[in-house]
């Protein structure tokens, strides 16, 4: 059996009872390490906390391992119980459909254990989840690569009065350009996590480029940091206001607010920008 288990957003204690029972009976446990382990500790200590709490050794599975050696993990699950742990929910912001398809094709039983994801946890700010349009991703711009396909999606959402959840770029274990050119042993860039501030700066640059007044400095947004953790930070304000806020450590995400209901506005008031933010 292959168990794909969501860990939630906070720390090692956010796993569900069903998920914990599955982990404890598994022969081998892998943990996705190509989106974020941040909420579970920036250092190796975070992983040791997981291992201590679950009472099992955990193997970190980076993007290369999952893409190139997933077959080995699936084959292990033919005769043994194997767990693949995922921060958030297995089918939330990062889907693992390919893993499920490959396992089922080989006749391996798959059980998914769900958990909280950024996709539903943003509801804490009071904006109702069924008032959201298509979710967009904001990638880091480079000197030669400044994609803006998200602009049309935000435009469509705003034309319908819908809120837009912006998932911000995470760059973990990205090969350096030099090592890709040279070949041989890969060298990696330091991890990078986009802040709300950088996202707004890029969004405004794209608006200036297109000039369609889809949004602007006075557009209401909600910025989130470390959603689901004890020290989470949530601030509602204009793009201009949020651009000056220190949201602290990652992970961050951003919601561009659409048309609001009085109940939504009442809840947002608790998170309104103050100069001390």
Image (spheres, helix red, strand yellow):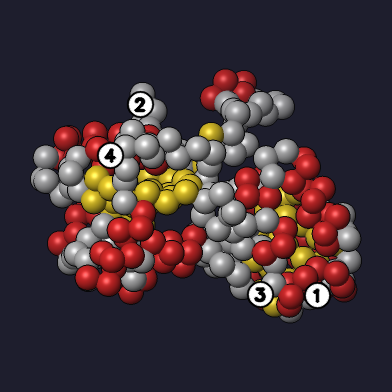
Which of labels 1 and 3 is toward the front?
A: 1
Q: Please tell me which of labels 4 and 2 falls first in the chain.
A: 2
Asked if one can make out residue 231 in the rendered structure from this viewpoint, the answer is: yes
- Expressed as whole percent of the image width and height from the top left, the position of residue 76 reads 83, 65
Quote the CA–CA distance across marks 1 and 3: 13 Å
Quote the CA–CA distance across marks 3 and 2: 40 Å
Q: Which residue is identified by label 1? A: 21
User: Which quadrant would residue 187 be assigned to in this image?
Assistant: top right
Q: Which residue is identified by label 3? A: 112
Q: Quadrant of the C terminus?
A: top left
Q: Which residue is identified by label 4? A: 241
The answer to whether the residue labelled 2 contacts the one labelled 1, judged by CB atoms less than 8 Å apart, is no
The residue tagged with tag 2: helix, strand or loop? loop
Which of labels 4 and 2 is toward the front?
A: 4
Which of labels 2 and 1 is toward the front?
A: 1
Q: Please tell me which of labels 3 and 2 falls first in the chain.
A: 3
- Expressed as whole percent of the image width and height from the top left, the position of residue 242 reads 32, 41
User: Which quadrant would residue 275 be assigned to in this image?
Assistant: top left
Which of labels 3 and 2 is toward the front?
A: 3
Q: Please tell me which of labels 2 and 1 falls first in the chain.
A: 1
Left or right of residue 271, residue 215 in this image: left
Residue at 32% over, 60% down: 268
The answer to whether the residue labelled 3 contacts the one labelled 4, judged by CB atoms less than 8 Å apart, is no
Q: Which mark is residue 144?
A: 2
Quote the CA–CA distance across marks 3 and 4: 41 Å
């Amino acid at each position: 059996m292959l168990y794909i288990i969501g860990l939630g957003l906070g720390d090692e204690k956010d796993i569900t009872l069903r998920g914990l029972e599955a982990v404890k009976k598994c022969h081998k446990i892998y943990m996705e390490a190509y989106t974020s382990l941040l909420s579970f500790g920036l250092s190796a200590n975070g992983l040791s906390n997981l291992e201590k709490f679950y009472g099992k050794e955990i193997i970190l599975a980076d993007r290369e391992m999952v893409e190139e050696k997933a077959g080995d993990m699936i084959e292990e699950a033919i005769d043994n119980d194997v767990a693949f742990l995922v921060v958030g929910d297995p089918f939330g912001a990062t889907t693992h459909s390919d893993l499920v398809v490959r396992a089922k094709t080989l006749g391996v039983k798959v059980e998914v254990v769900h958990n909280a994801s950024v996709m539903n946890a943003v509801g804490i700010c009071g904006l109702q989840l069924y008032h959201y349009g298509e979710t967009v991703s904001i990638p880091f711009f480079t000197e030669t690569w400044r994609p803006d396909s998200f602009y049309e999606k935000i435009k469509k959402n705003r034309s319908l009065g819908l809120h837009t959840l912006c998932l911000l770029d995470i760059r973990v274990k990205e090969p350096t350009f030099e090592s890709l050119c040279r070949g041989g042993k890969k060298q990696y860039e330091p991890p990078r996590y986009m802040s709300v501030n950088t996202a707004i700066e890029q969004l405004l640059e794209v608006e200036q480029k297109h000039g369609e007044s889809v949004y602007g400095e006075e557009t209401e947004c909600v910025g989130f940091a470390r959603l689901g953790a004890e020290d989470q930070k949530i601030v509602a304000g204009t793009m201009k206001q949020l651009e000056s806020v220190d949201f602290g450590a990652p992970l961050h995400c951003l919601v561009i607010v659409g048309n609001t209901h009085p109940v939504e506005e009442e809840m947002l008031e608790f998170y309104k920008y103050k100069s001390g933010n």
